[in-house]
Structures are given as structure tokens and as C-alpha cells.
Amino acid sequence: MNAIAFTDVSRTYGDVLAVDGLNLTVEAGRTVALLGPNGAGKSTSINMLLGLLRPTRGRIEVFGRSPDEAVARGEVGAMLQEGELIPELTVRELVDFVRRLYPRPLDLDEILKMADLTDLVKRRADKLSGGQSQRVRFAMAIAGAPKLLVLDEPTAAMDVESRLRFWESMRAYAAGGRTVLFATHYLEEADESSDRVIVIARGRVVADGTAAQIKAGAGGQTVRFTLGGQASAGLDALPGVTAVEILAGTATLSTADPDATVAALYRGTSLEIRDLRIAGADLEDAFLALTKES
């Protein structure tokens, strides 16, 4: 059974089409990153998945049920960008209060340990930093041991160390065969912490696959070398080259055929080539290319 199924789902706000005939399925047990520029429809799709919004057209199923039914059965946990914590409660009181709302919650100490909150259990919610508050929201999201965990920009306001610890906790939670869907603007998080990446733009899926597949689908590689004060004329005419960027004395050539480009650099130009590096497209390159095309 699929954990998530969107079938021809659209959502409009007046004359604005936020989600446009979205079709996608997510198998149970997968960790999926949802990427897209601002206004692409990510948050709208997540809110419909959680039953917080109704689609204008189409059908959404969570483990074969409607979102409302899945949420009522405690099968879904969510960590959203918005939502205030109860300021008068301590971290322990807040997390314990939430876990008691579910039929089969995780053990309280297990939740606190997984969310890296053990040292903060006595601190009131209104005394937490932004990153600490995010960790509490994560603890609340996993409190009911949901089969599907939905995270919308989960590491916002976290420093680098906190982000690393958070993803360790998320991977530990997912390791039990649970399904995780997370939206993020940090592309390295999608690259490192998901086994599938879905890119949406203008409310439609524009790419779907592993991070490696999407990077490969972006096409081409880069040839980078130190140009210094040498003339750059003619670099755009080299075999395979599709774009040239000169920045701070370094030339970066986007190319569909790096072997032919490098051979022409050495044999067909009088340039002194130093610090030559060849690299494949990264996820950021692929993301920018895909969203620009759409």
C-alpha cells in the first residue's frame, strides 16, 4: 500500500492556481524530499495532505484512507512552520501532554532523547531559542509514533550543529520502516537525507527520482580552471560548452562533453591552464535548471 497518493489534485485561491493537477505516489517506508521555489505549491500540498485544506479537484489518500481519517487514527505526525507552543508548560509537560492524545504513543523518555531535549525538560516553552523550539515541535510530531511523518522546513532557525543532530534523529526514526516527507530549502539536506527527491514548480511535478538521478538529468558537467588575467574570448566556442562564467579570475565552463572541452583547451588555445577541475552538476544546479525551465 502507498503511504501517499495524489490523483489529479488541484487547489485554487480565487484566480490563483496553486496546485495544478498534481499526481504522485510515495511508497511506505521511503524518505522523500519535496523541493520547489517559493510559491511552487509545496506548503499547499502539505496542508492538503494533512487535511488542513481541501483540494479544489482530485483525490488524496494516506494509507488508503482520506487525510482526515488517517490523522484521526494517529497515523500522521506533522511539524509545520507555523504554530505556537504553550508558553507556561515545560518541555516535558508539553511533550507528555501531546503524546497522551494518541492511542499508541512512544515512551516519553525515548521521544525526548530522539529529539535531543533531555537537557531541556524543565525549561518553559517561552524560554526556548528558535532552534530549541523546532526540536520540541519535532518531538511533538513523533510523539504518537506516526507511520507518516511530515516535516515542513524542519531545520529553520537551527544552527549547523543542531541541524546535523536533527537529521540523525530523523534518520533514526525513519529506520523503523516509517515514511517521512520533508520540504526544505537546504538542498544539501535533500541530497544527504532522502532516498527520493520530488521537485515541483507551478504546482506540478517537474522531476522525480533519487538525488543522483536528478543531478544526472540536469545534464552536463563543469570544467573549472584558474584563468587569471588571460583573455577569455573564444571559450564559449569550445566543443560541448553551453555556458561560460568568469568570476574572480576563475573560469567555469558548463559543458555537455567535458573530454572534448578539455582536449580543446589544451590543443586549440594558447591559454595556460592551471588548477583544472571537472565536476558533475550538483543538486542546486539541477534544481535551478529544472525550476527555470518550468
Image (cartoon, helix red, strand yellow):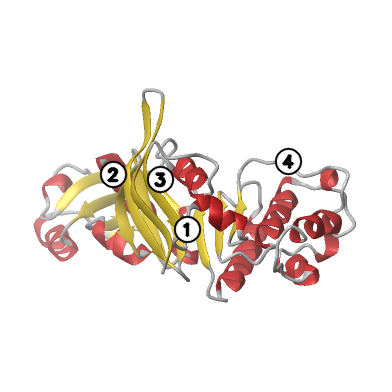
Residue beneath label 1, please?
A: 65
Residue beneath label 4, please?
A: 84
> Residue at 35% of width from left, 40% of height from top?
203
Mark 4 and mark 3 in contact (Cβ < 8 Å)? no
Residue 276: % across, % down: 29, 62
Residue beneath label 3, please?
A: 36
Q: CA distance from mark 3 to mark 4?
A: 26 Å
Q: Reading the chain from its start, which is encountered first: label 3 or label 4?
A: 3
Q: Which residue is outermost to the bottom?
A: 176
Q: Reading the chain from its start, which is encountered first: label 1 or label 4?
A: 1
Residue 265: % across, % down: 16, 58
> Residue at 32% of width from left, 53% of height from top?
286
Discs 4/2, front? 4
Discs 1/4, front? 1
Q: Is residue 185 above or below residue 10?
A: below
Q: Is residue 259 left or right of residue 32?
A: left
